[in-house]
Image (cartoon, grey):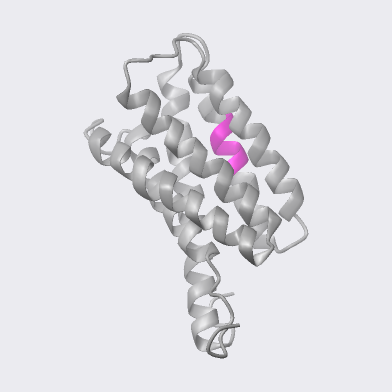
Amino acid sequence: MENGRMMANPAPLGLAAFGTTLFLASSSDANLWNRAGGAPVLAMALIFGGIVCILVSILEFIRGDAIGLVFFGTFGAFWLTIWYYSTSQVQPVGIGGPYFMSFAVAAFIFWMAVMRRSMLHNIFGFFVTLTMAVQAYGNWGSGNLNAIKIAGFIGIVTALVALYMAAKALINDENEKTILP
């Protein structure tokens, strides 16, 4: 403890970074902007989704929260690899489906780990897993644009759950009582 205060909870920042980046990417996948969101998605993937989530992962390690460490580290790396493959000359043709499926498996493991924490964690784990699984299907082989669009809408729901979790933690901690259930 420093100055009588414990370390702040980094999870709301990580959830905000994950949620806003996923919202931007998913709304683009859902074709809400006629696929005009590429550059902002890549900037968010690098900085907010990638770097910030990695930093939150380190802070979760310091706090001793293994689940936060693994989730934010895993999905920080997810966003960094999305940025890398989208901006580099390396185009991993045909591995989009397996790429997303590997993160669906990671999300499923995360979901199983948090299932007993709260109903909200359970809902979040389910939707992260579903988003990644449908993205895997949509990006398998030559791809399926309808599945990617559906994954986009599921991702928007996932992002909203993450942002609600961030708001809940911030608002309830700041007020030292339950305001958001």
**Can you tell which quarter of the image residue 127 is in?**
top right
Which percent across, then down, holds residue 136?
A: 55, 24
Horizontal side of 105 relative to 172 (left or right) equals right
Image point (72%, 55%), residue name: 114
Query: In what quadrant of the picture does the C terminus appear?
Result: bottom right
Does the magenta stretch mainly form a helix, a strand or a loop?
A: helix
**Can you tell which quarter of the image residue 27 is in?**
top left
Horizontal side of 14 relative to 46 (left or right) equals right
Which percent across, then down, holds residue 12?
A: 50, 65
Q: What range of the chain is rendered magenta?
A: 128-133
Residue lying farthest front? Answer: 2
Q: Is 131 in the magenta?
A: yes
Seen from the viewer's position, the closer of residues 42 and 7 is: 7
Identify whether 131 is placed above or below 173. above
Seen from the viewer's position, the closer of residues 34 and 57 is: 57
Image point (54%, 72%), residue name: 169
Image point (52%, 72%), residue name: 168
Which percent across, then down, holds residue 61?
A: 63, 58
Which percent across, then down, holds residue 5?
A: 56, 86
Identify whether 114 is placed above or below 173. above
Identify whether 134 is placed above or below 48. above
Query: In what quadrant of the picture does the N terminus appear?
Result: bottom right
Residue lying farthest bottom? Answer: 4
